[in-house]
Image: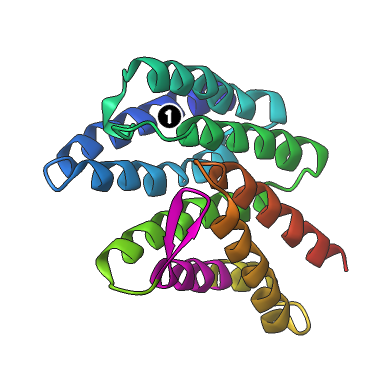
Amino acid sequence: MSNLIGIIASYAFIIVVIIVAKLFEKIGKEASRKFIHIALCNWWFIAMYFFTNAIWVSIVPLSFVVINYISYKKNIISVMERDNQDGLGTVYYAISLFILAIISFGVLNNPLIGLAGILVMGYGDGLAAIVGRKISSKEYKVGSTKKTLAGSATMFIITFVILAIFLIDMQFWYIKAIIASIIITIVEAVSVKGTDNLTVPIITSGILYLLMCI
């Protein structure tokens, strides 16, 4: 019963996020996209509360792999799509949720490992893009993608804070968090066309797992 409630709660949460995002379109299309990007990562808390195994928890993200791809092609959920459609970022987002759901709820039996990666993707990457546009700083290019020092600095700080929460009980936690945050910030910088939605959460969770095993 808990799993069925989790499915209902998950889709209800996603629908509410999309509806609220429509309000952010008054500020700008990118504002609505980043609201969705940040807000949806909190779905993992719903998953941890309701779902009891990897099969059930994977249903929601797997369904959105399909839904987001169709939306990318047909611009169905326009509030989350870029006008120039420069990458499968929304699809990668759902794929990363699906992969980490299977691994952390199933293989590792530790949803907190997946939580770290999803939060870094949601808040780190999401706020980095916002700050990068709001604060004037030096730009640099990776392929055809423009990055800013302010955005990368934001990514590092938020990643450090999130990882510090998970590592704080460990010896030399701050050194481990700093090194991991540098690696993840570089990964985000070099991941182009929305692939950061795939590389950042998976690599973050992988690093955290390794650090917790040391």
* Amino acid type assigned to the residue bearing label 1 in the image: Ala
Please indicate, yes or no, whether residue 168 appears anywhere in the rendered image: no
Check disc 1 and report the residue beneath it.
Answer: 9
Residue 159's x, y, as percent?
55, 66
Say whether residue 173 is left or right of residue 6: right
Residue 193's x, y, as percent?
50, 41
Above or below, 173 relative to 44:
below
Residue 68's x, y, as percent?
45, 23
Say whether residue 38 is left or right of residue 191: left
Q: Nearer the viewer, residue 46 or 117?
A: 117
Q: Which residues are magenta?
A: 139-160
Q: What residue do we see at 32% from left, 20% from top?
A: 75
Dot 1 falls on a residue whose secondary structure is: helix
Residue 159 magenta-highlighted? yes
Picture quarter with the N terminus:
top right
Say whether residue 15 is left or right of residue 163: left
Q: What residue do we see at 72% from left, 43% from top?
A: 104
Residue 148 magenta-highlighted? yes
Q: What residue do we see at 73% from left, 61% from top?
A: 208
Q: Nearer the viewer, residue 135 or 176?
A: 135
Q: What residue do we see at 69% from left, 72% from top?
A: 167
Picture quarter with the C terminus:
bottom right
Please indicate, yes or no, whether residue 61 appears anywhere in the rendered image: yes
Above or below, 125 relative to 193:
below
Question: Quadrant location of residue 123?
Answer: bottom left
